[in-house]
Image (cartoon, rainbow, N blue to C red):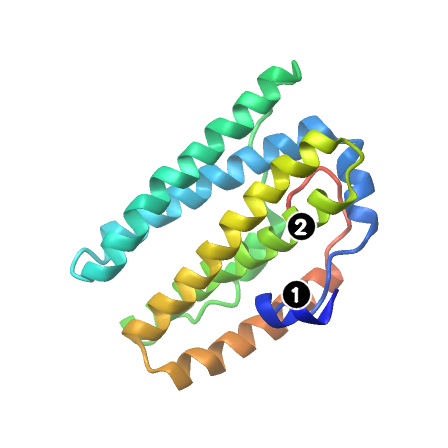
Amino acid sequence: MEQAEKNILGLQLPTDPRWVDLAAISLEEILTDHAYCEQKAATSCISLIQRYPDKGRMVRELSPIVTEEWGHFRLVLAELDKRKLRLGRQRKDQYVNKLMEFQKKGGSEEDRLLDRLLIFALIEARSCERFKRLSEGLEDEYLRNFYRRFMESEAGHYHLFIELAEYYIDKQKVRQRWKEWLDYEARIIAQLEVRGDRMH
């Protein structure tokens, strides 16, 4: 991974280069998984709004993200339709499930909020990195541009979740926990099988 990209996203381990080639030959599967990722991103923002209605800035800033992520879901559906591919069934996301295992159990409400925001930031950062790989590595020029637009959007979302964490919680605490998340995520990436039918 280029040093500048690493500094921007913070990710400790780049995606295996083989992933893009595998994704290219599993287009229906990767678009299906991408569609459900966008859907889950929208519902995750809704769940945060529902759980923390008293946190005005978070409610205001996440509300348009819900609309944007659902719009992305529709864009991916349209791409499937255009290519005469079908939306398959949603599958378990091993990556996200592994991340969830690292969330602090019990503890204060602040700790739980912090981990929720950081796990969403991490998913957006990894998604952004994957979209960048697709935008640079696919042979299909249209799909390269398609994924470049998604990459730019996810980068903004990643920053927003970090900013919200630092707004509601002590910045030093946020940065320390973020480093722990990044180290843990790198271990997950190193262990997971490289599969072209999954976005993560």
Residue at screen point 50% across, 60% down: 100
Task: Single out the residue that lies furthest toward the left.
Answer: 54
Closer to the N terminus: mark 1 or mark 2?
1
Snapshot quadrant of residue 59: bottom left
Task: Single out the residue that lies furthest toward the top.
Answer: 84
**Residue 106 visible in image:** no
Give the SS element for disc 1: helix
Against 147, residue 180 (above or below) is below
Q: Nearer the viewer, residue 180 or 98?
A: 180
Instruction: Please tell me how crowded label 2 is: few (under 14), some (14-19), or many (20+) other residues with Cα within 10 Å.
Output: some
- At which x and y percent is residue 4? 67, 69
Q: Nearer the viewer, residue 158 or 86?
A: 158
- At which x and y percent is residue 108? 30, 76
- At which x and y percent is residue 197? 71, 37
Instruction: Please tell me how crowded label 1 is: few (under 14), some (14-19), or many (20+) other residues with Cα within 10 Å.
Output: few
Task: Single out the residue that lies furthest toward the bottom.
Answer: 172
Against 77, residue 102 (above or below) is below
- The amino acid sitting under disc 2 is Lys
Residue at screen point 47% across, 78% down: 177
- The amino acid sitting under disc 1 is Glu
Q: Which residue position is annotated with label 2?
A: 132
Q: How many marks?
A: 2
Q: Which residue position is annotated with label 1?
A: 5
Disc 1/disc 2 C-alpha distance (Å): 10 Å
Q: Which mark is residue 130?
A: none
- At which x and y percent is residue 49? 26, 51
